[in-house]
Amino acid sequence: MKDVKNVSRRSFLKGLGLASGGLIIASGTTLFIGCEPKEVIEFNPNLFVQLNSDGNLILVASRSEMGQGVRTSLTSVIADEMEADWDRVSIKQAVGDVKYGDQNTDGSKSVRLLYEEMRKIGAATKAVLIAAAAKKWEVPTSELKAENHFVISNSGKKIGFGELVEIAKTIEVPKDVVLKDPKDFKFIGKYLPSKDVENLSNGSAVFGLDKRLDNMKFAAIKRCSVTFGTVKSFDKTEALKIAGVLDVVEIPRVEKPFGPLGGVAVVATNTWAAFKGKEALKVEWDFGANANYDTEEYMKQITANVQKKGKVAKTVGNVDSAFKSATKTIESTYQLPHLVHTPMEVPNAVVWVQENTCEVWAPTQEPQRTRTEVSAFLETDEKNVTVNVTFLGGGFGRKSKPDYVVEAAAVSKAINAPVQVVWSREDDIQHSYYHTIAAQYMKGSLDKDGKVTGWLHRFALPSIASTFAPGTVDPAPFEAASATNVPFEIPNMQVETGGAPAHVRIGWMRSVINIPHGFAINVFADELANEAGVDPLEFRLNLIGSDRIEDTKNEYKYDTARLKHVLKQAAKNADWGKKLPEGHAMGLAVHYSFLSYVASVVEVSVINNKVKVHNIHSVIDCGLAVNKNTITAQMEGAAIFGMSLAFYGKITAKDGAIEQTNFGDYQMLRMPQAPNIHIEIVENNEKPTGVGEPGVPVIAPAIVNAIFKATGNRYRTLPLKDYKLV
């Protein structure tokens, strides 16, 4: 860690809207990727503390809030180490700027990356305040402690943090700080309510759709139904007849990973008029190379690819020999469709371009990337672009791709006025970055004792890499990782990949590649257990094998004991093996992703060929649980998210166009379908790991495994609505 120290108040507060008085404490540690660290005086930290003389404490959050509670989780770590009064804390959202380090709120990594840093910031602030009190009272710091926003002496004398501000400004921040013993935590590891609940409940929280500026216009964009199609010509006559429509302008396609698809924007005095004007537009399109994209035919192609030898991504032992000498071999093919994020708040952005400057207000998961893309489009320096991060009404990875913000910048520049671009739900579903479509082939072998001797996993799917490097047909290394890192102790294993060109924009969605891999691996393991005649729980524990630490080539080692523990605990919580009513059964799944261990046991009933989920028991080991309240909520949300994907998730294309339009044909789980969800968080003091995503991959396979146990029918293709099971 670099020094934690006081820095220039002017350089810190300029453009941040904070008060000019008070004590500023900043961290000098950078978490940049591909950036050289600079001296503290030249940049702002990832998060910082402003303590005012009235005792009020402002903590700046650098990550985006989309319901996962990150603002509360990260700032509570500072407050705990600082011994602050949580009721005196308010949170300020950081703008997008490299001075905060990595601000990308994606990949379940916010707490994982920032936890230690936040602790050090809090501890350093506490040390400065204690030193200030020691100076004021002329006593050694060893006679003082901080508690609940006060510094207290051994004799019982106490002084509030705010009263120490002026002296604290003169104190040099220590290079080394002493962190609290975890047993003394007051906020960390507890069930701490979100700091934002009140504002979210009373409507004062500002989401992207809430933002308003004087003289602001509203715009809706008509895009080509076929991805990457372009405008040949358009007739705006009928659109201009709509009351409230002011102008119609063409938006260029920007051929970059996060560039807008292009189209024709209708500018109006309100959103409804803009939408109606868009409907009235007449546009002739050049559909381009993807006009023949048909997901049904494409699935046949990639399924054929996984039926033949692929490129080897990992090999252990000799699977061919294992298959030849096996008592039994089992083969299965799994097919999963495209998916889309559909956050409740559609993509939207307010942008005001004025000469060489631009200000943005947007629900973005990646404010720095947004700033970079907007400045590149406007051909101006990044210092001229300010990105204000609003609350996000859900994100799931969609809002880390700022194409919708660049669109708004293009419209604002064209009309020389502030504008809010709002996508409709149809826009959101039909012009997104899609979760990959996937085909997977599995082959396994059993010996005479029912032990697995060979394991082959072959998959083909259009890669996220294709969005960054068009023409890519092979998966990126991380897209093979959840298959190559399979935690089973099998002597002969091989993972292979098949080619799969992309015809739409492929992007990451909550849990990313773990959705298809977690499904195939967990369902196939259940199939092997059935062939071996062994209980699925016992079989899975045997597959995982001995307690061992596997080197995953990072600071976090893969611990099979922790994986087995969550599986056994989920089974215990569900009372695995108990007698159930007729038509009921349980299924299980376990998966390691985002450095966390998750297992779920799902109880379903299948009555008159209709599936109902009654109970979900999930257990997560995510290291130290910083805020159990938000972890529980995210795991509950992951269960619902996973059920929606299992029952309904399917995006299809015909003649190059996405066929789904809204929640009528891309359904979400409804409230009456919600089961009882039971979450257990494993208690330990390991380093914090991911939470937002790892609860998703286990849900669909556990449901499918439970259905098999109840009916004897195995489903290897999702969603279940295709079988009329829901």
Image (spheres, grey):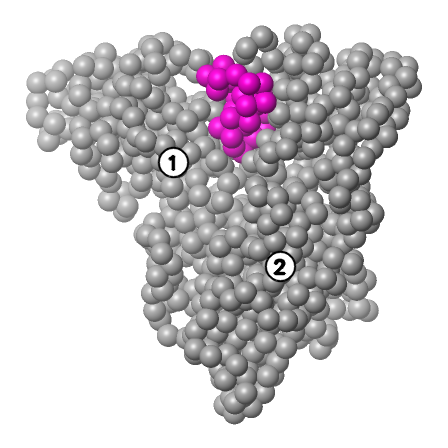
Indicate which label's residue lies in the foreground, 1 or 2. 2
* x, y percent for residue 713: 73, 74
The quarter of the displayed image where residue 150 is located: top left
Mark drawn on residue 112: none
- Tag 2 secondary structure: loop
Q: Is residue 218 magenta?
A: no
Marks 1 and 2 sit apart, C-alpha to C-alpha, by 30 Å
Q: Amino acid at mark 2?
A: Gly
565 on left or right of 479 = left
Q: Is residue 361 magenta?
A: yes
Q: Amino acid at mark 1?
A: Gly
270 on left or right of 379 = right
Is 504 in front, or is 519? 504
The quarter of the image holding the C terminus is bottom right
* x, y percent for residue 195: 47, 30
Q: Is residue 199 visible?
A: no
Please tell me whether residue 693 is drawn above or below residue 29 in the rendered image.
Answer: below
Name the residue rendered at 66%, 43% in the picture: 505
* x, y percent for residue 569: 46, 65
Mark 2, residues whose alpha carbon is within 10 Å: few (<14), some, or many (≥20)?
Answer: many
Please tell me whether residue 257 is drawn above or below residue 183 in the rendered image.
Answer: above
Q: Which residues fall within the magenta stretch?
A: 359-388
Residue picked out by circle 1? 34
Residue picked out by circle 2? 499
- Tag 1 secondary structure: loop
Mark 1, residues whose alpha carbon is within 10 Å: few (<14), some, or many (≥20)?
Answer: few
Name the residue rendered at 83%, 33% in the picture: 285
Q: Earlier in the sequence, mark 1 or mark 2?
A: 1
Pointer 1 with pointer 2, Cβ within 8 A: no
Name the residue rendered at 38%, 41% in the picture: 113
Q: Is residue 333 visible?
A: yes
